[in-house]
Each structure stands twice: as C-alpha cells, then as structure tokens.
Amino acid sequence: MADPSSYRPKPGQIPDSPGVYKFRDEHRRVIYVGKAKSLRQRLASYFQDLAGLHPRTRTMVTTAASVEWTVVSTEVEALQLEYSWIKEFDPRFNVKYRDDKSYPYLAVTMNEEFPRVQVMRGHKRKGVRYFGPYGHAWAIRDTVDLLLRVFPVRTCSAGVFKNAARTGRPCLLGYIGKCSAPCVGRVSDEEHRELAEEFCDFMAGRTGTYIRRLEQQMTDAAEEMEYERAARLRDDIEALKKAMEKNAVVLADATDADLMAVAEDELEAAVQIFHVRGGRVRGQRGWVTDKVEAVTTGDLVEHALQQLYGEETGDSVPKEVLVPALPDPVEPVQEWLTERRGSNVSLRIPQRGDKKALMETVQRNALQALGLHKTKRASDLTTRSRALEEIAGALDLDSAPLRIECYDISHLQGDDVVASMVVFEDGLQRKSEYRRFQIKGFEGQDDVRSMHEVITRRFRRYLAEKERTGEWTNGENASGDGAPRDGVSADGTSTEGAPRGNAALEGDTTGNAFAGNAFTEEDGRPKRFAYPPQLVVVDGGQPQVAAAKRALDELGIDDIAVCGLAKRLEEVWLPHEDDPVVLPRTSEGLYLLQRVRDEAHRFAITYQRTKRAKRFKASPLDEVPGLGETRKQALIKHFGSVKKLRSATIDQICEVPGIGRKTAEAVAVALAQAAPAAPAVNTATGEIMEDEEVGASGTTTGSPEEPVTAGASHERRGQET
C-alpha cells in the first residue's frame, strides 16, 4: 500500500486549467482516469487526510504510485479525452457499465450495391442504418416479416445472393413476393435502393405520410375497378398498421427522445434507457455497474451518456435526452452531445406530463434490473461476506459460517422418500459435495422422522472419519464419556462394535456407488462427508429443527449450529426457541439462506422424480447381475414377453444367443422371485393389456408412445437403485 504523499506533486506543478489526469500503480498500469475544470483543485482533493476520503477513493490513492495529467483547451475536449482513455486503458477504479445483454439491432446495409435488411449485434459499421436496439432478435424478425410485404428488400446473405444470380433462380422469398429479387434482375439497383430508403423512412417513424399515400392509391385503384390491385394495397396497409401496433404511442407529436433512469445503492447502480422514436418505444437497454469510486447520480448519468453516445453520430443521438439528474457542470456534456449529433440536443429532467410519467416507468425498470442483478451477484465477495456476517449475528454464532449444509425431504404422497444435502462454502455452491439420500429406516410420509434419519446418517460418517484419521484419541467420543460408539452397517442401521473406519452407508450417492474404503477417494484424500459444516439449515420450521438438533445431540455433537427456514413467512427457527428470528426482507443474510434452501429443494425434487421414473420403468430382468440392455432385449425378442420368459426352462433360455447357463439360471431365479405384474393399462383407451403386449422396459409394444401406468414396477420398496 503506497503512501499518497510519496508521489504528491507540488502545488505549483499542477496547472489551474481544464484537463484529464491518470493515476498509475507501481506496475505503470492506469487504474483511474478523471477530468477536471481545474486540475489543481481536483488533484489537491485526492491528497488530503486519508480519514476524510471516501473509502473507495482512499483505496484508489493508496493503490496508485504516480499521477500524471494532460491539459486541454475546453471542458468538452476533457470529456472527449476522458472517454477515449477509459476505453483504451479500462481502469479498474472507474465506473464501468456492464451491458446486461448483447442487444440486437435492425440494420440496413446501405453501403452495399443491393442493401440488405438483417439483425446485427456488436460494433456499428460505417454506412449501415441501424434501428433499435430491440429486446429480442425475434421481435426484429417479426417486424421485418410484416414489412417485407410492402418493402420487398433483400434479406439473403452474400452467398445466397451470388448463387441465385449464377443460376438465374431467386430464393423462396422471391417467389412469394417478399423479395424484389434484384439477384435475377427483376428490379434495377436504383429501384431496389429506393425500396430500402422507403423501408428506412418507415422504420425511422415517418409512417403517417406513407400510409396515407397507400390509402389514396387503394382508393384510386378501386375507382378504376382494379380490384385485385386495391385488395393488395389494402393488405399492405393492414400489414403496416400491424407492424406499427407492436410499438404503442407513448409520446405525442412524433417525439424523438432517450429516457434514462438510475437505481442505486451504496455499492451498485443500474441504468435503464428507453429509446423513443416517432413517439413510440423502439428499444430498451440497461447496464449495471459497481460503484468503485465516490460518485453522485449526476456522475452516473454522465458516465452512462459517454458510453451510450461515445461512438454515435447524426440521428443516432436524439434531439432530447431526459435524465433523472444533471451532470455538474451540465454545459460541457450538452455541448458534447450537440457536437455528436450535429444539431442542438436538449438534456433535461422531465417535470410534468407524459414524459414524466414515462420516466417513472423507466425508473421502475431500473429498480427491477438492480433487484435482478442482486440475485445474480453471488460471485461478489463483499456481498457474500456481509451475508455471512449477518447470519452469524442473527444466529449468535461465534464466527461467520464459512460452510453451510442444507437438507430437504422430498416424496410423492409418501412414496419414493428421498433427501438432499447441498453445500455452500464462502456463500458459493459446491456442487461436487452435494449428496442424495434414500430414506430406509421406515416407510411412509414423516418429514420429521426422515430429517432425523438423514442428519444421523450424515454425521455418523463424519464421526467415523474423525476416528479413522485419529482426531479422537484414547478412545474418547465427541461427548468425552469414553464410551465406544455404534458403527454403521450397510443398510444404514447401527450395529454394536462395527469398525467405523470401514463403514459403508448405501443410499448416499452422487451417481456412482462407493468402492473400497467408504471415506477415501482413490488418491487417498478423505471424502467430503469428512468435513463438518459450521451451520446446518433444514427446510422447515420448529419440528424439523428439533429433529435435526436431537440427531446431533444423540451423536454427541455440540459444535454445529442448526436453524430452519420456514417458507410461509421466511422465518428462521432455532432449537429450543419459541419465537423465530425475523431477518429484514432486504437482508443479504436472509437472501443467502433462501438461496441455500431453494437449492436443496431443487436438488431433492430432481432426485425424487428420477427415482419415480426409474420405478415406473423397472423390469424383473433389471435384478439379474451382469445382464445388460442388449441381452435383455434379445431375451424379450426371442420369447416375445416376460410372461413367456418366466415359464421357460433353463435349457430354453440358454438357446438365446449370448446367454450362458449361469446367466440363464440367474434369469430364472430373478423371475421366480419377482411377483407377477398386475395388468398393464393402455392410458389412451383404458384397455387392459395382455402381458404379451408389454416389453421388458415396462412400456406397451403395440403403442410405444403410451407408458404403462400400472404393474410396471417390480422394485421392492426401499431397495437401492
């Protein structure tokens, strides 16, 4: 960290004139660019007592190692040079707006011999007319599809155009009247360019005159009894009006204006812009920025104007720009905009009427954009740290919970009961450490009992790993009573004296079965169950929290906090407390707990649906070890159905290619042990299907698109998949 006094220029060295300055760090990288009406006064403000500086400004001057400046003649030149340097150096401490999407434009390539209408993104090209931006590319294509009926301008690529010219045959649009087909000479280049100019005029908002002209032509054609031509003109007018209806009139008198609104908090700001052309909203765009420097709303507006119009000229800069606050001073910015447009530009705050009402709409969009950004800012370290600190304070924890585990129970009316465990470390998802559980201790619907079982099974593995790695010494358990703990058998039930280091717990899966030592990876590192969380969150209220706490108490674990988040009122419940902890709705801590809870719910319900789908598709042949899908299909194809296969002898099964005697015996045993399926039902007709019509996968062979809804499952309840 540098001392600003080490590189502070002497007061007499700094000129008292407009200019632009750059702060550089010790590696000569530009970290901040600014402009000033008086360089001497502005730079002096950075070298005052550090305690009096804004925290972000203090960080900038202590990161910098030198400062340099460039003198210019006017404030407008300073504004232009500042924009150029920000684009060139991308300083880390300057306000930088991040576009929330790459906005598409409707472009007409007037720089080509035969202008083309197309969707374009990215940097604007010279000689191309742009309209927009639009929120979605499909909105552009819908509009163009309507207008091509009236303005049949070329829309094909250069390759398609050249191929049509070579073969002498136009594309499909040329045949259906949505392209004038200049590729085959139906119109000259001058006629086609005139069509493109009319298209641009219509898109620019000059619609009334053109529609009135078409209506007059339609009337004249009808009077001359050219009814087919009049009908075509009528349809053209309807297409144009339909295209115009896609953008409602929001400002009278065919106003051209851009409206800008800003929503901000202490750390971030969102900017929303509505582009109004011809009184209609033609496009919308938005940015979000981190406030890495001390800025006012007027400063944010100025930076947004620089980004919005820095590379625009002519009609792309509207006559009127409406903003929530004016830059200080406003004159250089207004003069700069006037230079970009080539004529006078009004920069002001709307006070009344339609423009103020529309500005309120833009402001609401800015607030929504900022709120949406907040839900996506999990990668922001400052926000995550504040959220963890808020949780620690609300739950009275000794330190911030750097590892949070959340558990949720999912089932369908008591069937296929499963649970999920999701892990957040430092406020971020750790999907590699997610785990899934099948509830095996009982059958039916009991969320409280299920939660107790899951917490018990998860932390038994944690205790087992502690003992295996030698964290317990002298045979002491977590409660310090010296009594040996129960081991864990393969079915998840406790057994006296089982060696905890080799205990395996089925049903806690990540998609693959555990092999070898249940608590170590192949490279010898401990599995993720070995690491304890600082906070356990359960999806539910008092009963679920009490069950989780009771499970930890029974295991002798007293250094892990527990809480529950109830969905109805988003209340945080603590063990042994009659009243919930209510966090403010704007709390970052509550937002993080909600994200953790919602992720656990998503993970649990996804697993439950997968299990249910597998159960519906189950077959008794699935239980035969080593019998793959190819040989299962060979058996069904040979015998025709599971019923006939069940009645076959071992010798008959051996006749199937690829089936040996050992496999045939296993197939016979599996089919003998499995209960016969109940009749399958064709859901399309309600007809009860004969077993011959049902294949090994549990679907009807006669109607493959209709799943069997009854008798398709032969899986024993609670059995592992």
Image (tube, rainbow, N blue to C red):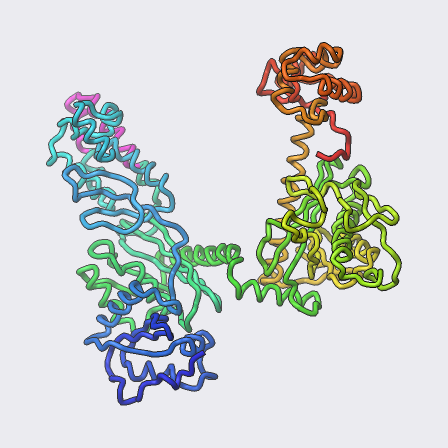
Residue 706: x, y in percent? Answer: 60, 20
Q: Going by the image, does 626 lie left or right of 149?
A: right
Q: Is residue 665 magenta?
A: no
Q: Residue at x 26, y 65 (%)?
A: 84
Q: Residue at x 66, y 30 (%)?
A: 614
Q: Is residue 151 at all visible to an observer of this figure?
A: no
Q: Quadrant of the N terminus?
A: bottom left
Q: Give the tally of numbered discs.
A: 0
Q: Going by the image, does 642 lie left or right of 45?
A: right
* Of the pair 580 and 659, the residue shown nearer to us: 659
Q: Give residue 342's quadrant in the image.
A: bottom left
* Of the pair 509 and 162, the residue shown nearer to us: 509
Q: Is residue 133 at all visible to an observer of this figure?
A: yes
Dominant secondary structure, magenta: helix
Q: Residue at x 78, y 52 (%)?
A: 460
Residue interval drawn in magenta? 216-241
Vertical comparison of 543 with 218: above or below: below
* Of the pair 220 and 114, the residue shown nearer to us: 114
Residue 418: x, y in percent? Answer: 71, 41
